[in-house]
Image: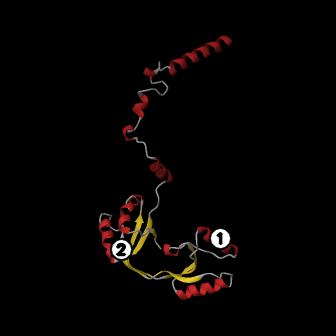
């Protein structure tokens, strides 16, 4: 019995050796070939493989970004024509220019201060009494703080009175910007294909910022 088991083991080892060495390949029985040229034959369009730049690789890993609506303006009439010329090559329906009037904006203002350190101290004092503040959109008022923006001076004056009851003593109402009339640029669906063309618009935007539609 032991002799029979030993004989079967020797026979099995011999068959395995022949299979692993490809000796049984003519009969269609052999392991998958891992050495060349078999792996090269299994490649699909190896000439299409390329090394991606780091920024493109990160963008692909993050996946496609959904389209977004962006706006800028209003622009004066003299600034509209350069925009039209740059946008003439964009796909139809990817942009529009329309007349718009933006009301003036009034803010409850604290400033101007001597420096950023002084602004930081004022922020700390406002936090202690629970008064919110926001950054300024008019660089001419820097360094300073806005305690809220309003479409009319009357609304801003009312807010100033409310803040005075909470301990705000040095604020005042100022007009952050006057009423603006002109043409507003709208890009309703900026996808990955159009995002790469936004830099081309910067010269014609004349410092205006593309921001999410409202």
Task: Choose mark 1 or mark 2, whichever is in front.
Answer: 1
Quadrant of image for the N terminus: top right
The answer for how far apart the CA atoms under marks 1 and 2 are is 44 Å
Quadrant position of residue 135: bottom right
Pick the residue in front: 163 or 118.
118
**x and y percentages locating residue 100 in the rendered image:** 40, 80
Quadrant position of residue 46: top left
Q: What is the residue that sits farthest to the top in this orientation?
A: 3
Q: What is the residue that sits farthest to the right in this orientation?
A: 128
Tell me: 10 left or right of 137.
Answer: right
Identify whether 77 is placed above or below 155: above
Q: Which mark is residue 121?
A: 1
Q: Residue at x 64, y 72 (%)?
A: 123
Q: Return the disc, 1 or 2, that comes first in the chain's sequence.
A: 2
Residue corresponding to mark 2: 97
SS of the residue at dot 2? Answer: strand
Q: Residue at x 70, y 73 (%)?
A: 128
**x and y percentages locating residue 16 in the rendered image:** 55, 20
**x and y percentages locating residue 195 in the rendered image:** 41, 60
Q: Residue at x 49, y 75 (%)?
A: 140
Mark 1, residues whose alpha carbon is within 10 Å: few (<14), some, or many (≥20)?
Answer: few
Residue 1 is at least partly visible in this image: no
């Amino acid at each position: 019995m032991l002799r029979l088991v030993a004989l079967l083991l020797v026979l099995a080892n011999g068959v395995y050796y022949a299979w692993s060495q490809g000796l049984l390949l003519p009969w269609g029985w052999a392991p998958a070939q891992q050495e060349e040229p078999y792996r090269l034959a299994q490649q699909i369009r190896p000439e299409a493989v390329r090394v991606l730049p780091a920024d493109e690789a990160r963008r692909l890993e993050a996946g496609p970004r959904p389209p977004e609506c962006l706006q800028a303006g209003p622009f004066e009439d003299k600034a509209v024509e350069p925009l039209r010329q740059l946008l003439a090559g964009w796909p139809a329906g990817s942009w529009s220019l329309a007349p718009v009037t933006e009301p003036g904006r009034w803010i409850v203002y604290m400033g101007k201060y001597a420096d950023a350190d002084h602004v930081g101290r004022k922020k700390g004092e406002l936090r202690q009494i629970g008064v919110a503040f926001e950054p300024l959109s008019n660089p001419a008022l820097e360094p300073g703080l806005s305690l809220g923006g309003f479409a009319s001076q009357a609304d801003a004056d009312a807010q100033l009175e409310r803040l005075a009851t909470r301990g705000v003593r040095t604020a005042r109402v100022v007009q952050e910007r006057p009423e603006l009339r002109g043409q507003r640029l709208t890009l309703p669906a900026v996808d990955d294909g159009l995002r790469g063309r936004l830099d081309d618009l910067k010269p014609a935007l004349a410092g205006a910022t593309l921001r999410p539609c409202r």
